[in-house]
Image (tube, rainbow, N blue to C red):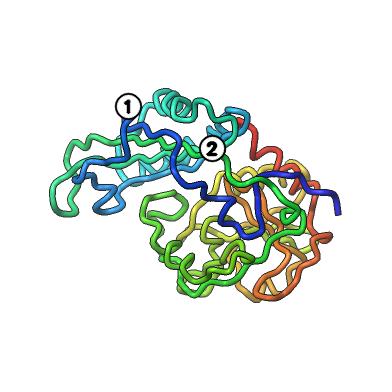
Amino acid sequence: MKAAHAGTQTAGGASAVSSGTPSRILVNGEQVAEHLPLLDRGLHYGDGLFETVRLHQGRLCQWQRHLDRLLLGAERLGIPAPDSGVLRAEGLRAADGLSEGVLKLILSRGAGGRGYRPPASPDPVRICLSYPAPAAASEDWRRGVAVRYCRAPASINPILAGIKHLNRLDSVLARLEWDDAAVAEGLMLDPFGSIVGGTMTNLFVWDGARLISPLLDRCGIAGTVRGLTLGLAATMGIECLVMRIEPADLRVAAGLFLTNAIIGVWPVRELDGRPFDLAELPWDLIESVYDAARDSG
């Protein structure tokens, strides 16, 4: 097995994806204290979208992929799309002074009266929050991470499938299921028993020759690094399949790995007590994904 790159991951996962208090908050481009209008529909109904962007050497990593998904989500939800140039400028302002960190972008439909019906002419709210970089790397990333299954299912809604909308209660309930810091992530299934992915990650299955990732037409988030991985695999001549995956498929898999924008890539060394030999994984691809996830894109 090739040596893995050092990064910002930890085996427990918690410190790799959360880093406490924001360094800066901008609302519609203005620096403010931590507040939001009480009538905002994002607060009342989860009526909005978000993106979590990695900052590396002061750059917004894979920015175009994040922007494309946000604009797709805005179209799906009928929220007026933000100006791409304004959004990027505000993101960079929020992240100013951070060489390594995390930028969270939230697009809410804005304020509205009581009831589900949106206002005829919404005034969307843009929120940018920057956070310090996650915890420093350790040898745990080289060893891979431990993963478990979650009991909480992922809710099916094809209209919302793929986009990163604000209502993430499925993942919240799933993440409540364990406190063991040695477990980095939990895999979620849909009500039909098909694997969707992790609470915060996308899943890739390696069968020894091909790469397989769950079909996300019913639920789940189409991650930016998921798309990056599928593209890199294709350019490297690795056959990629996107299809329904059941737990039985994982029991016979040669290896697994997980991706998201902040961690980049996590090889899985253990799933519910079943060990995986990391040497079986396609390390040329994994290292390429890790490097490319930190590019500006």
Circle 1 packing at 10 Å, graded few (<14), some (14-19), many (20+), is some
Name the outermost residue toward the right.
Answer: 1
Name the kind of residue labelled 2 in the image: Arg
- 194 w.r.t. 72: above or below: below
- Count of marks, rendered view: 2
Q: Which residue is mark 2?
A: 65
The residue depicted at 52 percent of the width and 26 percent of the height is 97
Front in this rendered view, residue 240 or 16: 16
In the drawing, does residue 284 fall left or right of residue 180?
A: right
Specify whether residue 205 is in view: yes
Check disc 1 and report its element: helix, strand or loop: strand
CB atoms at circles 2 and 1 under 8 Å apart?
no
Q: Quadrant of residue 106?
A: top left
Circle 2 packing at 10 Å, graded few (<14), some (14-19), many (20+), is some
Name the kind of residue labelled 1 in the image: Glu
Name the outermost residue toward the left.
Answer: 114
In the drawing, does residue 73 fall left or right of residue 99?
A: left
The image position of residue 289, as x and y in percent, is 70, 44
- Between disc 2 and disc 1, the foreground one is 1
- 172 w.r.t. 68: above or below: below
The residue depicted at 38 percent of the width and 55 percent of the height is 159
Specify whether residue 230 is in view: no
The numbered mark at residue 30 is 1
